[in-house]
Amino acid sequence: SLRKAVFGLAAQLPPGAVTDLAVHQAPRAFFREIVRAMPGFVVRYRLEELVTARQLNQHVGDMFRANAGSTDPRAINLMVFRGREELDLIIRMHKQRHHIIAKYIHGPQEVAEAAQANAKLNMSPFLASFYRSNQISFPPTTVRPALSSAPPSQSTPLSKK
C-alpha cells in the first residue's frame, strides 16, 4: 500500500535528505538558513577585516547559482545534503579560519575574475567592434616647453632644427 511504500522510501533516505516533493524548496530553505547564520560566522571566524556578511552571502549565492541548472532530484538532494554537512562543520568550528578564507573568500574572487576575463575573450565580433567604435579618442596633446634656464632651442622637444 502507499503508506508502506512511503515509509519504506523514507527509511532508505539518509537523515536530512530531501524527498521529491520538496526538491525545489530545499535549496531555497537551505540558502536562507545559511544567510541567517552568516553574521555569526563572520564574527566567530574573525572575517570582518576581509569581507562583510553581505559579500560572503553573495559568494555563497554565486555557488548556488552555478548549480541552478541541475534538474535531477537525486543530484539536488546530494548537493543539499553535502551543503548541510559543510554548514555543520562550519557551525561546530571544525574548519579553521584559513579554510574558510581559502574556500569562500579568495576562491570565489579568483573564479569571478577568471569569469570576467573569459567573458571579455568570448565577446561576439559585433560587441567587440561596438566597444572599439565607442571609445573616445582625443586629439594628441602638444608638449609644452619645460621651464628652465637653458635657451629655448635646447629645452623644447618640438623645436625645429
Image (cartoon, helix red, strand yellow):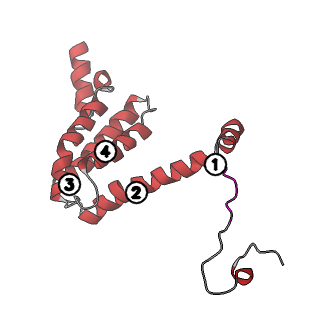
Instruction: Return the residue at label 4.
Output: 82
Mark 4 or mark 3, which is nearer to you?
3
Residue 115 horizontal/vertical position (percent) = 52, 48
Of label 4 and label 2, which has the lower sequence position?
A: 4
Q: Main secondary structure of the magenta part?
A: loop
Residue range corresponding to the magenta coloring: 137-142
Mark 4 or mark 1, which is nearer to you?
1
Residue 152 relative to residue 148: left or right:
right
Measure how far apart labels 4 and 3 are at the Cα level. Answer: 21 Å
Residue 60 horizontal/vertical position (percent) = 33, 45
The quadrant of the image that shows the C terminus is bottom right
Residue 101 horizontal/vertical position (percent) = 31, 60
Task: Tell whether position 40 is magenta.
Answer: no
User: Closer to the camera, 123 or 13?
Assistant: 123
Instruction: Return the residue at label 1.
Output: 121
Give residue 26's quadrant in the image: top left
Of label 3 and label 1, which has the lower sequence position?
A: 3
The kind of residue on which mark 3 rests is Val
- Please tell me whether mark 1 sits on a helix, a strand or a loop: helix
Residue 67 relative to residue 144: left or right:
left
Of label 1 and label 2, which has the lower sequence position?
A: 2
Task: Tell whether position 139 is magenta.
Answer: yes
